[in-house]
């Protein structure tokens, strides 16, 4: 059993501004734990988490792979989340490099075809577009969940970028809910980018039916 990262350094005040790990986060940790042996044997060198929030997921990856076995890059649009990510890395003895940017914007060109392990737990809750756009334009806690039409507005933007980031043997974990239309996501990634994916874990949590999708380069 791989321990859940220690987040005792983060306070209720931090979680007023930064997404507090919840069922979606923990389902993602479970999927990564299930794949732990496989992940270790594939020896990823560059890991990139988009929207790292508290840093819990990347700290967990660092625990699985070893703190100095890979470069752990994280991005978030919320600068307070970037600070929490770095602090969580320190607390868990994993060096998390945090970049405040929109998705992978400031890194994309340099990381093309270099990312061995890519992770995104996006804002996936269906809202109207105005709410999603305003959350993105002044990033605070709402940017953690407001996903626009079908909860897919930001995810769709990133799904166009992800295939180009992945290294030849790279893999990509994505969190989604039923309302995001998972069969459509899987079909689009296969048909448009030749990127095969499947649901590796799913769980109901209150009103949400959470899924973890894993895509792998052929
Ligand atoms: N990864 C964390 C976890 O699993 O607990 C947080 C997930 S939370 C559902 C989504 C995260 O994405 C938030 O931290 C939010 O600030 C971040 N985010 C939202 N829009 C973003 C964007 N355009 N670029 C980068 N990060 C973004």
Image (cartoon, helix red, strand yellow):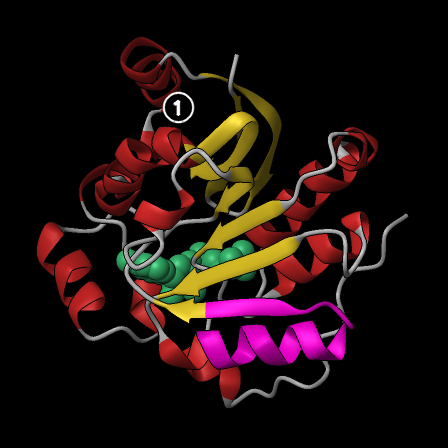
Residue drawn where x is 40% and y is 18% of the image? 186
Q: Relative to residue 123, is residue 40 drawn left or right? A: right
Q: Position of residue 90 (x, y in %)?
A: 70, 78
Report the magenta residues as a range.
82-98
Q: Is residue 20 visible?
A: no
Q: Is residue 76 visible?
A: yes
Residue drawn where x is 14% and y is 67% of the image? 134
Q: Relative to residue 110, is residue 22 drawn left or right? A: right
Residue in front for this viewpoint, 218 or 133 = 218
Q: Position of residue 145 (x, y in %)?
A: 35, 58
* Figure quadrant of residue 157: top left
Say if 16 sits above or below 109 in the image. Answer: below
Q: Position of residue 95 (x, y in %)?
A: 67, 69
Residue in front for this viewpoint, 178 or 30 = 30
Numbered disc 1: secondary structure: helix
In reply to whether residue 86 is colored magenta, the answer given is yes
Residue in front for this viewpoint, 131 or 80 = 80
Residue drawn where x is 41% and y is 45% of the image? 111
Residue, far right:
1
Residue at mark 1: 182
């Amino acid at each position: 059993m791989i321990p859940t990262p220690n987040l005792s350094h983060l306070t209720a005040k931090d979680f007023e501004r930064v997404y507090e790990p919840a069922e979606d986060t923990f389902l993602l940790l479970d999927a990564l734990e299930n794949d732990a042996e496989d992940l270790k044997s594939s020896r990823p060198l560059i890991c990139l988490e988009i929207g790292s929030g508290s840093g819990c997921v990347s700290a967990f990856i660092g625990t699985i792979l070893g703190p100095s076995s890979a470069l752990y890059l994280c991005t978030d649009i919320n600068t307070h989340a970037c600070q929490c990510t770095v602090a969580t890395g320190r607390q868990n003895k994993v060096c998390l490099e945090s970049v405040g940017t929109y998705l992978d914007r400031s890194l994309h060109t340099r990381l093309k075809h270099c990312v061995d392990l890519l992770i995104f737990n996006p804002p996936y809750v269906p809202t109207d577009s105005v709410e999603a756009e305003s959350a993105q334009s002044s990033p605070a806690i709402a940017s953690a969940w407001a996903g626009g039409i079908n909860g897919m507005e930001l995810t769709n933007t990133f799904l166009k970028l992800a295939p180009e980031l992945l290294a030849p043997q790279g893999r990509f974990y994505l969190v989604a809910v039923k309302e995001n239309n998972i069969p459509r996501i899987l079909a689009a990634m296969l048909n448009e980018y030749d990127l095969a994916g499947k649901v590796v874990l799913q769980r109901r949590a209150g009103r949400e039916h959470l899924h973890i999708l894993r895509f792998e380069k052929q």
